[in-house]
Structure formats: C-alpha cells, structure tokens
Image (tube, grey):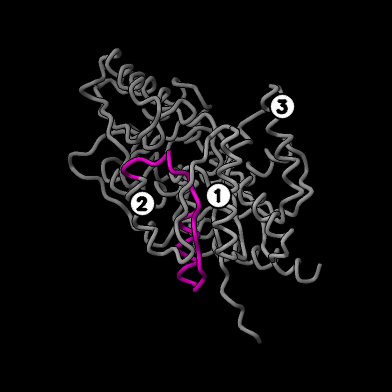
Amino acid sequence: MTEEKPLRILHCLRAPAGGVFRHVRDLVDEHVAAGHQVGVLCDTKTDGEYEQKLLAELEPKLALGLIRTPIERSIKPSDLVALKKAYNHIKSLQPDVLHGHGAKGGVIARIIGSFLRVNRYRVARLYSPHGGSLHFRRASLKGQIILRAERFMERFTDRLVFVCDYEKNTYFSRVGEPRAKWRRIYNGISAAEFIPVEKVPEGVDLLYIGNLRDLKGPDVFIEAFLRAERIVGRPLNGLIVGNGPQRDEYAHRIGLLGLGSRLTLRPAMPAREAFALTDIVVVPSRNESLPYIVLEALAAGKSVIASRVGGIPEMLGADSQALVEPGSADALAAAMARALTEPEWKSSIMPSQDVLRASFSTSVMAGSMLDLYREALAEQSTG
C-alpha cells in the first residue's frame, strides 16, 4: 500500500482569539505531529497581549508560516487589498488545502482557492462557519444579504464542516440545504485536558471566563450573581476573567450594584489556570456554536451551568438541569444556588469523563478532518 504524502494546509481566520483560534491551534498541533506542513493566516488588529503570546508559541510549528494581514470584521473596500496581498503570498506557498474559519476566513480561503484553481493549482477549499454569519436572521435586510452571500459562496466550496449538529441545523434552516458536500466533526480536547484541576484554597464560588460582550452574557452573570446571593442567604465571591469591548460597562455595573468587593474582573488567562480558582463555571451565552470552554471545564472536573443555546446541550445532555434559558438572570441564579447548596448536584447532573472522551477528542477531530481534506483532493484528481 502506497504511503500517503504529507499535506500542505493553510488555515484562514480573522481574529486569532477565542474558540475559533483554539480550534485552529488544536488542528495545527495534531497535523504537525502527524507530519504535515501547516500555516495560519489571520488579522493584525484583533489580538491582545494574551493572544500575542499564543501566536508566539504557535509560530515555530508553522512550516508554511504565520501570515498577518488587516482583516476587518465587516465588509469594506479594503478587503480587496487584503485579498490581493494574501493571494500573492498564498500562491507562493502552493498549499494542498485552504481551510477558512468564520465568515471572513471562509471568504479568503474560498476566493483565493478558486483563483488558484483557475490557474490549474490542485487545492481543496473548506469552510467552517463556527457560528459567524449564522448569528444573523433573514428578518433583517443585513441578515438577508449575509445569508445570501453564504449561499453564493457555496459554489466555491469543496466541503462545509460543522462543529456540532446545532450549527448544521442552523445553516440548513437559514441558508438552505447545502449544494456543497458537508460533514459534522465535533470539536475535541486533548488527553492532558482530562486531568482534574483542584480548586485552590483562595478560590471563588463562581467563575465566568470568556469574551466580555453581551453576546456571551457577562451582564446576565452579574445580575444572577446578586440574585443567587439572596437565594443562598450569604455573600458569595465570584470572578469574571476575560477581555472584550464591554469590559468597562461591566465594571461600572458591578460598582453600581455594590458588588465590587465580591465580584472582581481579571484579564484573560489560560483556562486551566482560571479553573483552579473555582469548582463552578458559568457559561451564560445568548448565542454559541460548540464552545470549548464547556468542554474544557467538564474535562477538568468542574461543574458547568450554561445557557440552552447552540451545541451546549450536545455536551451536557438535552435534558440537563444545568441548562437554563438564555438571558434569564432568575433561572441562572436558581441553578447557581443549587450547585452551591446541594452536595449531590454535580455527581447527578454532570456527564461522565468516559462519555466526554468518547465524543470529544482532538485526535478524532483531526483525523476526521484529514480524511475530509484527502477526500476533497481526490475528487479533483478524478473529476
């Protein structure tokens, strides 16, 4: 049997931050370890000190390099300049696979991949939405434009990849049944992340970790924290960890509610460092795809309370009592109070480690992705 040759894989994304970047880093680690050459293209504007550190750790692994170019969140004329610059660089790398992540990364990978194909390059064009455009609805004019653009871009797509059934179902309902071939491949976490993280003595009752903007629900967490204190009947202590555009708003709200001594804000840090500060992680998002923070917290042995959104029920179980309605501070506070006061809550509610390992593994994720890359490339050879 002929040994399959290593692939040259380039991941394109806008912001080197959050769950999308985590997904790309995991794929890079697994595929580099398997002998493939990998590169990353991302924005120059959206990373802070923490993200710069992660990029510095990632760059030595990238045989195809780390390409930085300005990529705006919204559609702007400057996108054409960025595309041309990226095209010239990517063409010189001669990739086998261009994998776009998120709306902007997906456009870059598929447009540039299509120009390469016109010039007789053999390259597979893949797109993972990761939520992105799927947050929009057809009820608004902007939503119609964006979702129709998603539909149009299918003609430049060899494979669509969804990270959970919720994302797939959302795409089907808002964009339509794909004309391109697709597959659902769950996000995964590494074996090292299943090592339990013990809470330090100076830890807190409740932790929020994530981006500081209303979409992720820190405002709901703050309101629920105050109400949970009333239910429990004692002062609590909590921590909000992360960076984001609404940080100052949340700090002001905490002060107005008189919570400054009990609920504190800290900048972004590695998730497992934050997990050592608590036994209960709260994920109050208004919208999600398949957030890594839930997987990471569960694997670290933490209790998780989360909104019933996106693919979170696929991790916690559709009927889990740890799920609450998004945006409801009352429901979130009640679940937080139960987790704090009922000794058997965690063991009776949280999924087992064996169940998590069987469904959410980086090795399974990366292997399935490689199969998809080779499948798309093989079609070009036989087409």
Range shown magenta: 24-50
* Residue at horizontal 78 percent and vertical 43 percent from the top: 177
Above or below, comparing residue 178 to residue 236 in the picture: below
Tell me the residue that label 1 is attached to: 85
Front position in the image: 217 or 42:
42
Q: Nearer the viewer, mark 2 or mark 1?
A: 1
**Which callout, 2 or 1, points at the residue further toward the start of the chain?**
2
Estimate the x, y position of residue 306 in percent, counting from the top left: 47, 35
Q: Secondary structure at mark 3?
A: loop
Q: Going by the image, does 103 lie left or right of 278?
A: right
Residue 107, percent from left and from top: 63, 45
Residue 265 shows in the view? yes
Q: Which residue is mark 3?
A: 138
Callout 3 crowding tier (Cα within 10 Å): few <14, some 14–19, many ≥20: some
Circle 2 is placed at which residue position?
A: 54
Lateral position of residue 159 relative to residue 20, left or right: right
